[in-house]
Image (cartoon, rainbow, N blue to C red):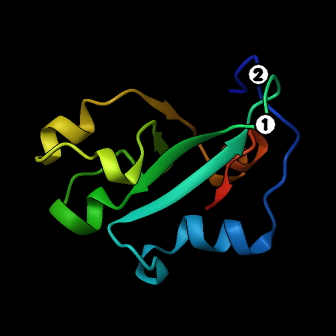
């Protein structure tokens, strides 16, 4: 589902590869993401989280958590409770403007 302020898709094949392959994430279990905002030059920041590979928790594979890597809460339950955008596929996530940061 596209949000009302969604920019045009900017993700390349490299981004889609990284979205789907946490074993290649340099900061695993996190993959920092960004997307441009329509109304400013600032970027919106988010993270993909390899919950399945980290704790065996499923259902968050295509979820962007709206947090900066430097502002992580101390526990996984607190992290999973953060505001987030949930997508059905990585293509939808890319269509909503997210790219690897």
Residue 25 against residue 74 in the figure, above or below: below
Q: Residue at x 32, y 67 (%)?
A: 29
Residue 56: percent from left, percent from top? 19, 60
Distance of label 2 from label 1 (alpha carbons): 13 Å
Residue at (51%, 75%) from the top-left corner? 21
Q: Secondary structure at mark 1?
A: loop
2 or 45: which is nearer to us? 45
Assess disc 1: are there few (<14), some (14-19) or many (≥20) residues with their C-alpha within 10 Å of its C-alpha: few
Which residue position holds label 1?
A: 41
Q: Camera-side residue: 56 or 73?
A: 73
Where 90 falls versus 19 (above or below)? Answer: above
Q: Is residue 23 above or below residue 89?
A: below
Q: Quadrant of residue 43?
A: top right
What residue appears at the point 26 percent right and 47 percent down from the top-left corner?
Answer: 72
Are the residues at dot 2 and dot 1 in contact (C-beta closer than 8 Å)?
no
- Residue 5 shows which numbered tag? 2
Give the quadrant of the N terminus. top right
């Amino acid at each position: 589902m596209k949000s009302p302020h969604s920019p045009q898709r900017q993700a390349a094949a490299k981004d889609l590869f990284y979205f789907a392959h946490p074993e290649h994430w340099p900061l695993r279990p996190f993959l920092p993401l960004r997307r441009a905002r329509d109304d400013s030059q600032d970027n919106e920041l988010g993270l993909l989280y390899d919950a399945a590979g980290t704790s065996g928790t499923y259902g968050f594979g295509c979820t962007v958590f709206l947090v900066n890597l430097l502002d992580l809460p101390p526990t996984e339950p607190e992290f999973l409770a953060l505001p987030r955008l949930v997508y059905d596929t990585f293509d939808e996530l890319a269509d909503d403007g997210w790219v690897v940061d």
